[in-house]
Amino acid sequence: MRVADLDDSPHVIHPEPTSFRGLVQESPPVAIALVDLHKSLGEKVVLDGVSLDIYRGETMCIIGGSGQGKSVTLKHIVGLLKPDSGSVRIDGRDVRDVPLQS
């Protein structure tokens, strides 16, 4: 027996849920945002349009094979590398605008 067989009322697909309005919590603010990040090292394209949002309080793991861009991504986040194009934002501020401190 199917669920639809138990209910003989007309089936209506609602464009948005109405029973959960006001109950869904907003996402925490984005702490780290990678936006269309591109980086080549010599002839090798390492990052090709990477976009990622990491929210405040969220734990993120970057996994992949050797040479897939994990370290290059992290070096962009901490400001050790500058993207060829795209941006990295920490709390809304572009890392290119934050001076490295010793």
Image (cartoon, rainbow, N blue to C red):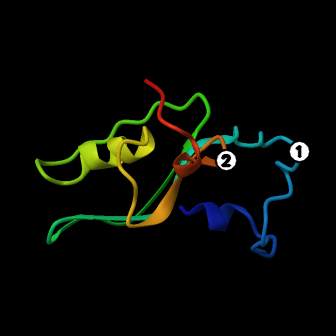
From where the camera sits, is residue 35 visible?
A: no
Q: Residue at x 70, y 42 (%)?
A: 27
Looking at the image, can residue 45 be seen?
A: yes
Task: Residue lying at the far left in this picture: please name it.
Answer: 66
Q: Residue at x 76, y 70 (%)?
A: 8
- Closer-to-camera residue (36/42): 42
Mark 2 highlights which residue?
Answer: 92
Classify residue 14 by image quadrant: bottom right
* Amino acid on which the number 2 mark rests in the picture: Gly
Q: Position of residue 45 (x, y in %)?
A: 22, 68
Residue 100 locus on image (x, y percent): 47, 35
Query: Residue 96, image x and y in percent?
Result: 52, 50
Question: In what element is the residue under mark 2?
Answer: loop
Q: What residue sits 53% from the left and 38% below the top? A: 99
Q: Which residue is mark 1?
A: 22
Residue 68 in the image: above or below residue 102 = below
| Up-down relation of residue 70 to residue 4 (above or below) | above
Kindly indicate the quadrant of the structure image that contains residue 75. Answer: top left
Crowding near pointer 1: few (<14 within 10 Å), some, many (20+)? few
Q: Kindly state the secondary structure of the residue where label 1 is placed.
A: loop
Left or right: 68, with 84 as reference point: left
Quarter holding the C terminus is top left
Residue at the spot x=85%, y=51% of the render?
19
Q: Is residue 27 above or below residue 7?
A: above
Nearer the N terminus, badge 2 or badge 1?
1
